[in-house]
Amino acid sequence: MRTPIKLSVIVPFYNEQDSIGPMHAAIVAAVEPLQIPFEMVFVDDGSKDSTLARALELARQDPRIRVVKFRRNYGQTAAMAAGMEYAKGEILVTMDGDLQNDPTDIENFLQKIEEGYDVVVGWRHQRQDKLVSRKIPSVIANWLIGKVTGIAIKDNGCSLKAYRAAVIKNIPLYSEMHRFIPAMASIAGTRIAEVKVRHHARRFGSSKYGLSRIYKVLLDLMVIKTLASFSARPLLWFGFLALPPLIVGFSLLGYALTASLMSNAAMSLPIAGSGLIFLTSAFILVCSGALGELVYNLSDMREHEFARLTQRVGRRAATIGIEAQ
């Protein structure tokens, strides 16, 4: 019988041929002394250099390594999601493949998980990055994310995080969503902790991140806010969205009607038609919210019915077991 894997260390790589060997050695040196069954899931995110070849060579030498290959570059979030899907450990730890995260911090993350936390987030308190292009945008982004989501995390962008597999595998990830995992996990009432971590300057290659990703982060932030605040109240959310076109529609129709009455002329069709279009848009939004409310309530009812059925089956099974004795 195989020993269950306690820990999975997930590392996405993109053009990191010089980093993957030292990263493997650092993980082994940090985790082996903990004396727990572990594995390493290396995800090649469509690298154009010899990263994949070196990952496969390491896997032939160390059976604890599992390699996931992407045909092209899909981005860090997709790579992490794939690694999480293939990971078999009870606890999942994610980290960057550029050697800036320190695997020796993994022990502190495991301690926090053992204390009862579901998600543990790293905080690079002495970050070794460029001030203008990395540090300042990160400070602004973390402040904005905290204000919008209500989850005050000092360093959402730190890839070094730990999760209970049962929690993180139920959270959908796409686009740049990996930095919003704490906010998404909070919807399910998970316990979140932060841990100070070491951060090293990049030794090989160049950074894959830049200011061009800001617009993606802002769009994902809007999605998270919608899910966190209005997932259980879609009619309220769509009602808010319907207010601007409703006001504009009534204003245009009112103006067209007033102008027609005051000048004794025919009503302006372009203005009145525009008003009707805005009113129709508002009506469609409200109907969409009502439909979403219906779908949510039906799914909630089915979950409650399933829970009651499970309880009845459990009580019946207990009764049968007593009678059999």
Image (cartoon, grey):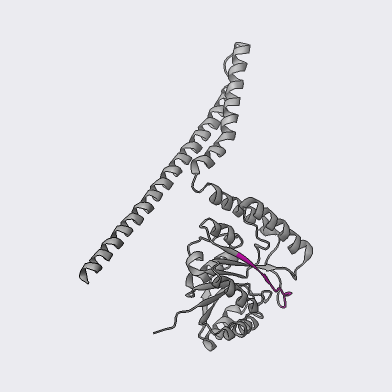
First to last magenta residue range = 193-203
13 to the left or right of 5: right
How many numbered marks, from 0 up? 0
Residue 165: x %, y % from top left: 49, 69
Q: Which quadrant, please, contains the N terminus?
A: bottom left
Spot the residue most to the top: 264
Q: 133 or 119: which is nearer to us?
A: 119
Q: 253 or 131: which is nearer to us?
A: 131
Q: Is residue 212 above or below residue 46?
A: above
Residue 24: x %, y % from top left: 60, 82
Residue 31 visible in the snapshot? yes
Q: Residue at x 61, y 65 (%)?
A: 193
Q: Which quadrant, please, contains the C terminus?
A: bottom left
Q: Is residue 258 above or below residue 187?
A: above
Q: Is residue 243 above or below residue 65?
A: above
Instruction: Give residue 244's quadrant in the image.
Output: top right
283 to the left or right of 260: left
Residue 164: x %, y % from top left: 51, 69
Q: Is residue 151 magenta?
A: no
Residue 248: x %, y % from top left: 60, 30
139 to the left or right of 74: right
Spot the residue most to the left: 324
137 to the left or right of 192: right
Residue 12 visible in the snapshot? no
Spot the residue most to the right: 131
